[in-house]
Image (cartoon, helix red, strand yellow):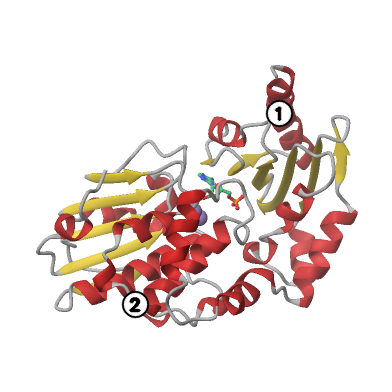
Amino acid sequence: MIGNLIEEIGEAKLIGITGHVRPDGDCVGSVLGMYAYLSNVFENAQIKVFLEKPADFYGFLKGYDQIDSTFAYPGQFDVFISLDAGDIGRIEKADKLFLGAKKSICIDHHVSNKGFGDVYHIEPDASSTCEILVRLFEDEYMDVDVAKALYTGIAHDTGVFRYSCAGPDTFIALSKLVRYDFDGSRITDETFYQKTYVQNQILGRSLLESILFMDGKCIASSIDRRAMDFYGVNSKDLEGIVNQLQVTKGVEVAIFMHETGTLEYKVSLRSNGKVNVADIASYFGGGGHVRAAGCTMNGTFYDVLNNLSLHIEKQLNEM
Ligand code: AMP
Ligand code: MN
Ligand code: MN
């Protein structure tokens, strides 16, 4: 665990920051929040950000235009920080930079994270990586740019402060951020709620084609390549569909998957509390949190569904 982040970084002159593949709001917020904060603390250090290009609507965050999505850097980093990634496989293209650094630091909140890097700080009970950063950051170096980024991340990982992962410490963290002068509801409107027309169309289609099984305790839907091409959408456009499936009355587990290759699906799992989906995703080589997890699986939609169902049913029967 990290007691003092500034001391941990020490005299570093070249600092790298990364997050997980297909960056979500917590990933973008924690990476750019860390960038803004370290820029305030270490005015003479060079700070580089490596991340897959996040959606344009994150463009209001400081450092967005500094993001390097080539993951190419010739030198060795003094310190390299991984944020919001549950295992080293999740930082994919940045893993060489991370492993090659003089010191590597991992800060994360996934219950499936076993710890990687020279120094790691994992709080499985934290709502988000951004919440952890609020506690690790010192007030004197905070500013509105840091606050906006961390607010964005907490908002996204808590479904705008609704999910059970948002506990007392989350709201204490938020109380520190909302003192800064920014429009929080604008951030959640523009980065969380707002959908493009095609995103809404594909959401509608996913709901329409969803299937309810296990006496209504499970709901599943999938989008194949053909449909994605037809609507002209990519993986990022499908975020949030699983959450809408999850709020179906009576449902314990929601499954949403989309085709990422031949007989290959990216699977998103959400639980309303009875089933631990982190265990199921981990079993299939993925990971995540008790109520929100993901993995990549092979086979047809029905193969994947059958494999997942066995695990869900087992957990429900054991109760
Ligand atoms: P998603 O369903 O992609 O929104 O992911 C839900 C949660 O599970 C997030 O916290 C992700 O970071 C995590 N997660 C998703 N896919 C994977 C994976 N393949 N390996 C590890 N963690 C994952
Ligand atoms: Mn994330
Ligand atoms: Mn997160």
Residue 138 against residue 95 in the figure, above or below: below
Residue at the image point whose x is 20% and y is 59% from the top: 79
Circle 2 crowding by C-alpha within 10 Å: few under 14, some 14–19, many from 20: some
Which of 155/102 is in front? 155
Residue 31 in the image: x percent, y percent? 39, 65
Residue 20 against residue 188 in the figure, above or below: above
Tag in front: 1 or 2: 2
Circle 2 is placed at which residue position? 143
Residue 312: mark in rendering: 1
Q: Amino acid at mark 1?
A: Ile
Cβ of mark 1 under 8 Å from ligand 1: the answer is: no
Residue 19 in the image: x percent, y percent? 41, 59
| Horizontal relation, residue 124 to residue 104: left or right | right
Residue at the image point whose x is 62% and y is 36% from the top: 277
Residue 52 against residue 303 in the figure, above or below: below
Image-quadrant location for residue 216: top right
| Horizontal relation, residue 305 to residue 150: left or right | right
Residue at the image point whose x is 78% and y is 73% from the top: 198
Which of 151/45 is in front? 151
